[in-house]
Image: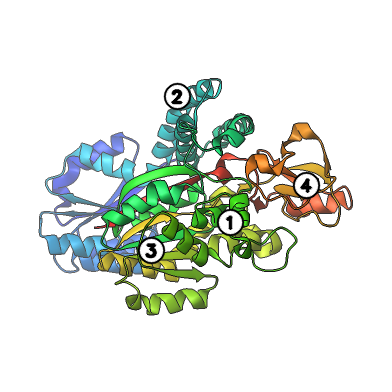
Amino acid sequence: MSVTILWADDEIELLKPHIIFLEAKGYTVYTTNNGSEALDLIGEKDFDIVFLDENMPGLSGLETLTQMKNRQPGLPVVMITKSEEESIMNDAIGSKISDYLIKPVNPNQILLSLKKTLENKKLVSEKTTMGYQREFRQIGMALSGRLDFGEWKDIYRQLVYWELELEKSQDNSLKDIYRMQKSEANSVFSSFVEKNYTDWLRSGQDDRPALSHTIFREYCLPLIKNEEKTFLIIIDNLRFDQWKALQPFFEQFYRVVNEDIFCSILPTATQYARNSFFAGLLPSEIEKRYPNYWVNEGDEGTRNQYENELFAEQLKRLGSDIKFNYHKILNLAAGKRLAESLSNYTNTKLNVLVYNFVDMLSHARTEMEVIKELADDEAAYRSLTMSWFEHSPLWDIVRSLSEKNISIILTTDHGSIRVQNPTKVVGDKNTNTNLRYKTGRNLQYDASEVFEVRNPADAFLPKGNISSTFIFALENSFFAYPNNYNYYVNYYRNTFQHGGVSLDEMLIPLIFMKAK
């Protein structure tokens, strides 16, 4: 496709060699020696890009730029100037120029600016395609080997990296290949978890991953002790790819000192994983030691209403006298109240903040048609998360914390996965409603399609009654009842769910940041 350039410079005759060079490369170039005529020309013809001299008599380059942007905000403009004054650069950049060149310019500089401005997406797409094609084979070979948990973390990092990079690619066939490889990785990971999970829970396992109930003791507390003040922020249901999407926001004010991944316990659901995080215990241990703080499936009451108490008990068991404040944000009004009163809490060594928006977004996407359309796939789900964060009280809180030089530990309780494939299960009326795990008596299912824990004690899970079983959905499957099967499947397919076994649910971020 032919590219048409407008070049406005009061010394345009001296630039004739540059124009001949560009025309030889296939570009069409229109020229003018003043800003007023440049404005007339963009009203008469369609240009793909404008080269604009900053220092022209009459209407200056910056004045011309302002009027151009008012008329055609999307028109790329490259400012060219003899001056290296910072104020001029700031004015030009503030007016949303696409590039800034200082005279004398040579033809190759002009060509590079053209490619960077007009062909950036295409060049990025091509480079991304070649990069993933090379790494595809390496990931495939790794999946065929015997991986430990550390190697799984590395593979998951690679998969998330390429998922984000391929968003920039125009090659849909390569995106399909990636989805196939991610599916294969989830299948192999599910087998890995089935084989090793109950062993990880036994004390004394040196090679076990960091898990929900150990992460505070082993990783968070040593960091908190070394910092003057820390905010421990738990964003419920935050996937690792969502963290990577949010990372640029945080990095405006914070330096990421350490980025790690740990493993959520099963079920990957708030009732189990987040209670374990705060208690420093596995679910059955919480039920046994603190029966007043544990609410079983089917019991009445909020299942995470005692996080503050469980956290205080964990600190006591660890012999820590750290003073802390606990905050739980369930809606916009509560978030605004905390942001407005933040100075009341920032003198405390530790503040624990639970923020529930992402979990609410996941549930809203299941139940509300408009949210389904806004978050149709993983990329849109990340985009919606970014949009929420940018306009949320949490973003205001983060900026305020940076001004007070308060460190942040950011983590979550579990992730989620976009479910696709229904798995039939039959249970009685007391069976829980979660789509990714089921517990109850007399469950009927195909054992080859689930990770089953016939004795809940093996997974340190509460035993509702003598014949209770836990089953967990694998990869991107979800449980569906035979009754009204088609309606149920169509309603829940492509929704984001949690509770089962998958990379996105179990491998979750743990980030330590210091204010810049």
Choose mark 3 or mark 1, whichever is in front.
1
CA gap, disc 4 to disc 3? Answer: 63 Å
| Residue to which mark 2 is pinned | 134
| Element under disc 3 | loop
Marks 3 & 1, CB-CB < 8 Å contact: no
Nearer the N terminus, badge 2 or badge 3? 3
User: Circle 4 sits in a helix, a strand or a loop, which is it?
Assistant: loop
C-alpha span from label 1 to label 4? 21 Å
Q: Earlier in the sequence, mark 4 or mark 3?
A: 3
Quadrant placement of the C terminus: bottom left
Q: On the picture, is 210 further left or further right than 250?
A: right
Q: Which residue is mark 1?
A: 289
Q: Seen in the image, is 64 located left or right of residue 216?
A: left
Residue 244 visible here: no
Given this view, does label 4 or label 2 mark the residue nearer the observer? 4
The 10 Å Cα crowd at callout 4, few under 14, some 14 to 19, many 20 or more, is some
Mark 1 belongs to which amino acid?
Answer: Arg
The CA span between labels 2 and 1 is 52 Å
> Which residue is labeled 3 in the image?
73
The quadrant in which the N terminus is found is top left
